[in-house]
Amino acid sequence: MKSTLQGLPGDAVRELRRLRFLLRLVTRFWARPQQAMLWWSVLVGFFGAAAALAFQAATHGLQWLLTGGHIGGYVAVFQALPGWQRVLVPTIGGLCAGLMIMLTSRVIRQKTQDYMEAVALGDGEVRARSSLMRSAAALFSIASGASIGREGPLVQLAAVAASLTGRIFRMPPARLRLLVACGAASGIAAAYNAPIAGALFVAEIVLGSIAMESLGPLIIASAVGALVVRLATGDAPLYAFAGFELAHAWELLLFALLGVCCAVVARFFLLALRAGRLAFARLPGAAWMHLTLGGLAVGLLALRFPEVAGNGHAVISDLLGGNLEPREVPLLLAVKVAAVALVFGSGAVGGVFTPSLFTGAATGFLFGAGLVALFPEAGIQPSGYTIVGMGALLAAASQAPVTSILMIFEMSLQYEIMLPLMVAVVTAHVTSRALRSETLYAAILAAGPRSVFDKPLAQVTAGDMMRPHPTRVQPAAKFREVAREFIRRPTRELFITTADGHYDGAILLSDVRPYLRDPELAEIVVARDIAREDLPILARGTGLTEAMGVFSRCTHDQLPVTDGPDGRLIGSIARADVFLAVSELARREHLRSGERS
């Protein structure tokens, strides 16, 4: 090797050696698109955890300011406040949240897109500025004790971070959509310390498909998000309670009956949320006035029932610990549901996931307490019915039974509840479908933005799903330039275009390997000398089903996309993106055909 380099300048020798070393690294460690998505999911998993921790810290800081130096659980904080402050704090929080939303609509003038819309209905683009402003509005509502969950803005922030990452690196729609879904999964896992349920929630409810192409990245992102939060806050289960065991085998029939009860209660809970929306929709005035009224309503209820403050987490813990008398729970349940409906109806930004868990916990607690009163010698444990009620009502309200089972298991880490939990969840799910109840997310998933995924499969083309601005060089480019492009933007295919942009062949990463061992030849060879012309070319208007057929007949991971007959290179499309897009389009067509029938 030394003799072959003797005739070359010293700078050229050093440059070729450096390129040879870097190209070997790229060749050895280059990841296919499916593998690369796993690495991207690690990154957005970290972003989701960071968003969770930052939002939690900001909430505590704002809570300290609004309550005059109190930090902690909302119920405990409100119990320590005098009456006038119980009313004033959520009212001020609602006012600030409303002003923030008004400012968003007037200054940014950008429709906020929920992460569910971006993934389930859109193409993965989540608008950053409006999402950040609405998350700030949610911060005021949640920190002031509004009866709403924090998972909504937390997951939205994680999805924004994922969407920005994908757009910075110009990911095509199918991959961007999956990346945003990974961010959402990470946010849910971080919020509830439930990595498996976080991944399945997004797969089952948002994506609507439990396919390995998407489930793998979702699991990785969810696991990373949960791991980072556990390192920062500990790994204790979210809802700990004393051990549970079935008193008798026939008790499973009682859990099945609990599932039926939870489905009925879930229907009323969803009707209450709808009533809250309709009531505020009929009220005159601006949005900031509605949110102020919602905060005032919570404050007035908190005068007598401080338990309405917050998302209900502390009250669930009291129910599981047996710290509440059964006679207190029915009124508390009614008041809490009313507070959630009022806050939700006023337009507050937040989630109803945890409030629905509280509703299920209270239903299960009352059911278990009633059984203890009827059968005092049977050894029935109300805590088991409380935790199972959470999962059963969640399954009925969300129509996601698999997610509900795993969510409750991960939040309690009690394996003994699995059998009764499965029975109750399935019963609740079937009963809810028989009652034709809507779901928690029906309103979001029914009216989202239009995107390329809303087209029929037969109308979607390679141009819709391609990645623009592919890596390219001109025919006369020297080997060094070719090598630098492979290193700068790691890929297995480098496209050659003429000065006016016409496609003129491709160079594969494997094609440059021989020149790593022959530096003198590398000094004289140009891109056109090593180009190959056997890569299939897809036109912009090529249908996705036809593109899928082309990929099935070749081994390449990425193909060029040209602008019609003139052959101008306008983008590239990856095999993995085609299959992801076809899967999603087929799912939506199936849903549309089901709605028509």
Image (cartoon, helix red, strand yellow):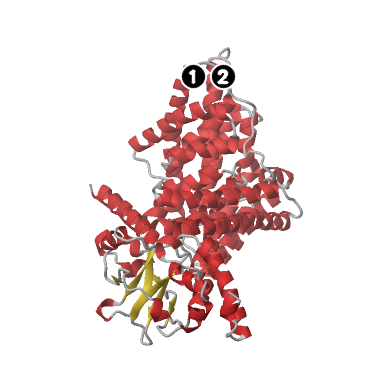
> Label 1 crowding class (10 Å Cα cut-off): few <14, some 14-19, many 20+?
some
Among numbered discs 2 and 1, the one appearing first in the sequence: 1
Label 2 sits on what residue type?
Answer: Ile
Instruction: Name the residue that disc number 1 marks.
Output: 251
Could you say which quadrant of the image residue 15 lies in? bottom right
**Residue 275 in view here:** no
Residue 128 visible in the shown view: yes
Secondary structure state at the residue bearing disc 1: helix
* Placement of 142 over or under 169, stated as above or below: above
Q: Which mark is residue 338?
A: none
> Is 434 or 48 nearer to us in this picture?
48
In depth, the one of 492 and 69 nearer the eye is 492
* Furthest residue toward right: 69
Residue holding disc 2: 380
- Name the spot of residue 338 as percent of width and height, x first: 52, 44
- Who's the residue at 34% across and 68% down the image? 464
Mark 2 falls on what kind of element?
Answer: loop
